[in-house]
Image: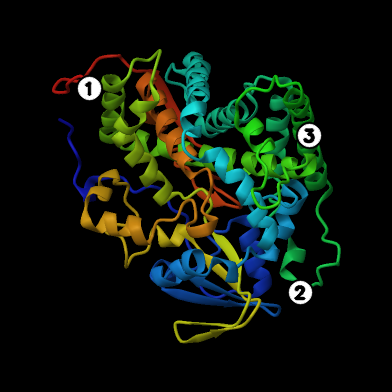
Amino acid sequence: MFDTPRPEQRPKPPKPASRVGKVSPWAYFKLFKRDILSAQPARLYRAWMAEFRTPFFRSYMCNDPALVDLVLKERPMDFPKSERVRTGLKPLLGESIFISNGDLWRHQRRIIDPAFEGGRLRSIFPAMWDSGVAAVERLRPLADGRPVEVESHASHVAMDVIFRTLFSVPIENEIASAAFATFREHQQEQPVANLLALLPLPKWFPRLHSRRTKRTAATIRGLIGQLIHARAGQIAAKTAPDDLATKIMTTPDPETGKCFDVEEMIDQVAIFFLAGHETSAAALAWALYLLATHPEWQDRVAAEALVTYEPDKIYFSTLHKLRDARAVFREAMRLYPPVPMFVREAACPEHFRGRDIARGSQVILSPWHLHRHERIWDRPDDFDPGRFDTPNGRNGLRTAYIPFSAGARVCPGSAFAMAEGPLLLSMLVRAFRFEPVEGQVPVPVAHLTVRARDGIQLRLTPREQIIPEGTTEA
C-alpha cells in the first residue's frame, strides 16, 4: 500500500559532527557546556568502552551491553547517581527520586511506584486525550503552510499532560502557565554544566550556581508548593480529584508508614516537570520531524489513526492498535534519546574489560552512542521504524535500547510515556500533514536532553479525513 524507499534513498536524520582530535580537560569542558554530543569523538560509536582522564577524576563510557546490564540491572546499588550531576540539578530537584541514592531513593520509590502501576494509566488516559485535543485546536490556526516552530508546541502539550494528569488542571491555569514559562527560562541556564562539579571538593563545600538558576528554581518550587498546599487541603476535606498528585500524596511507605511531606512532594513534582515534560516534548518534536522527512511513514501513521478511532473519542483499549505510531516513537527515541547520558559513580573498585576502575570513578552509560552503535545496529543512523520487526532490531531492543534507563532505576513513568507519545503523535498526524521547511535542518544538541539548537521548523496543512485506498476499517 505504501511505497517504501530503499535505504540509500532515505534522507539521513541530522546528527551532530563529532569532536576531531584530543583536547585538554578545560577545552573539553567548554565543548561540553556548548553541547554534550559534539564534544565526544566519533570512535565512541564503535567502542565498547572508552576512558576520559582529568586531573581530578576519571570517567569510563561503557557501550558494552554486558557492562550496561551490570551497572543498571545486576548491581545498580554499587553504581549510585553521580554527585557531579546532582550538583547541577539540586537547586530545582532538591532530593528528588531522579538524583537521590540509597535508603532515601528506596523510600521514594516505594511511594511513587504505585501511582504508575496497574490500572492507574487507564484512569489518567482521558487527561492525556484532552491534552491532545487541545493541542490540535491550538495548531489549527497555524496550519496554513507557513513554517511553525514545533518544539515549542511539543513542550506546550507535554507540560499540559503533566498538569492535567498530576493536578487535574490544564496548562492555561494561572500557576501552571507561570511554572511552564519559568521552567523554559531555567533550562537556558544549562544547570548540569556546573564547573564546580568537576572539582574534588568536600561535600560540605557550598556549590555555586548562577543567580538566574537559583531564582528560576526557587520560583518554580514556590509555584509547585502552591499547588501542593492546595491539594493537601482538598485531601483533608475529602474533595481531592483522583489524579497522580492525590495518589502520591496519600500513599504511605509500606515499610515506614510515612507519606511525603510538602518539601518532599515539591522535589518529586519538580522531577515530573523535568523528566515527564522535557523528555516527552523532545521525543515528540523529533518524531514529528522524522515523519515530515519520511512521508511514507507519516502516511502510515495517519492511515492507522484514521481507521482506528474517531477524532472526537478514543478508548484506552485503542492504544495497543497504534502499532505504527508506537514504532515511530520508539525509533525516534532510538535516534534522539531524550536523556543522552546517564552518569553513575563506582562505589567500590571495579575491573571492566581488562582495566582497573578506581572507587569514585564516573561510569557513563550513553543511550546516544549505544542506540547508534555501529557494531550493534544495522544502518544505525537511518530512520527505520520497521527495524524492530527484524532479528537485528529485536536484538538491539533487548540489549542496547535504554531511553528510560533499565533495572531498578528504570523510569517509573516509562509506560506513561509510551502511552502519551504514540497517542499525541497519532492525534497530530491524523489532523495535519507535516512537511519540512526547505533549508531548515535542525541540529541536535544536548545539555540535559536532546533538543534542536534553533528549534524545529515544519509546515502544517490540514489533512483530508479520507481513508487511503486499500485500507480496511479496524
Going from the N terminus, do you reach mark 3 or mark 1 first? 3
Distance between the alpha carbons at the discs numbered 3 and 1 = 46 Å
Residue identifier under label 1: 474
Distance between the alpha carbons at the discs numbered 2 and 1 = 60 Å
Residue identifier under label 2: 200
Labelled pair 3, 1 in contact (Cβ < 8 Å): no
The kind of secondary structure element at disc 1 is loop
Query: Is 470 above or below relative to 290?
Result: above
Mark 3 or 2: the one toward you: 3
Image point (66%, 63%), residue name: 102
Residue identifier under label 3: 225
Amino acid, disc 2: Pro
Amino acid, disc 1: Ala
- Name the foreground residue: 232 vs 301: 232
Q: Please state the horizontal and vertical placement of residue 258, each as a whole percent of the image.
A: 73, 46
Query: Is 25 above or below relative to 149?
Result: below
Going from the N terminus, do you reach mark 3 or mark 2 first? 2
Label placed on residue 96: none
**Residue 82, located in which quarter of the rendered image?**
bottom right
Query: Is 84 above or below relative to 335?
Result: below
The kind of secondary structure element at disc 3 is helix
Image point (59%, 71%), residue name: 78
Mark 2 or 1: the one toward you: 1
